[in-house]
Structure formats: C-alpha cells, structure tokens
Amino acid sequence: QVQLVESGGGLVQPGGSLRLSCVASGIIFRINAMGWYRQAPGKERELVATITSGGETNYADSVKGRFTISGDNAKNTVLLQMNNLEPDDTAVYLCNANLRRLRLLNDVDVWGKGTLVTVSS
C-alpha cells in the first residue's frame, strides 16, 4: 500500500506565501512523476503543477511565476512553494504520484487526502 501525506496548508493573507509538502511512503519501485492538483468548492479538480523524475516541470497558467514545484527523488517528496497568493488560490490541494509499486506491475496514480489552503484577509 502506497500512501501520500500532504502538509503545509493553512490560512494566509493575500500576497502571502505557503509551502506544501508531500511524502510518498510504502513499497515503491519507481515514481515517474509527482504533482499538485486543487479543487475549490463547486469547481472541478484542476492541475496546479507537476514534476517528473527527470526534473521536467509543468504549471497551470494561473500559477506561473508565483508557484514553484520541486522534488527530491531520494526522499519520494515533492514541494510546492506558493508566493503572492490570491483569494482565487483558495482550495483543497491534493498531491498526486504516478508510480510503479513493483517492477512487473503497471504504473498507477495515487492520491493524497489533501490539505486546505485558504487565502483571505
């Protein structure tokens, strides 16, 4: 069983910063990519940022220049540094990993339970 555990959410004022962390644990043969998605009340889940094991990154247009994703392959960890936060960034942020548990199994997507980020004055 693979688990993703997120941390770092909270309440922050507009213009403030937060850093989210996600750690994958369990039996893992290989992680192909990790990333962050978010879901605001009444809205669909949307991609925020992803990073591959090779370090390639991808960002939603709405967060480019404000958010930075980074990863530590040795620690199965992904971080999301969020700067200049806006009220529209308020959402539950979910960590995702595309990984292979054992060498002969298929790649699968695993999700964390999420951490709430609230941007409000």
Image: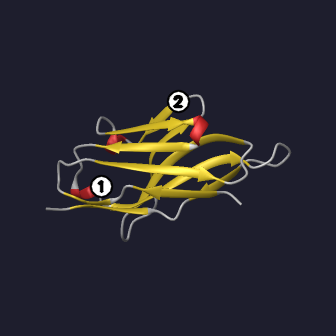
N-terminal of the pair, mark 1 or mark 2, is 2
Q: Where is residue 49 in the image (x, y as percent from the top left)?
A: 45, 43
Query: Dot 1 lies on which element?
Result: helix
Q: Position of residue 53 (x, y in %)?
A: 60, 33
Q: In which quarter of the image is residue 80?
A: top left
Q: Which three-letter amino acid code belongs to the residue tagged 1?
A: Asp
Q: Is residue 20 left or right of residue 103?
A: left
Q: Where is residue 119 in the image (x, y as percent from the top left)?
A: 23, 59
Residue occupying the point 54% across, 50% down: 23
Q: Which residue in the structure is indicated by mark 1? A: 89
Q: Quadrant of the C terminus?
A: bottom left
Numbered marks: total: 2
Task: Give the residue furthest to the right.
Answer: 104
Task: Give the residue furthest to the left.
Answer: 121
Q: For this rendering, which residue is in front, 5 or 119? A: 5
Residue occupying the point 39% across, 50% down: 20
The image shows residue 69, relative to residue 23, as above or below, that is: above
Task: Give the residue furthest to the bottom.
Answer: 42
Q: For this rendering, which residue is in front, 35 or 43? A: 35
Q: Which residue in the structure is indicated by mark 2? A: 56
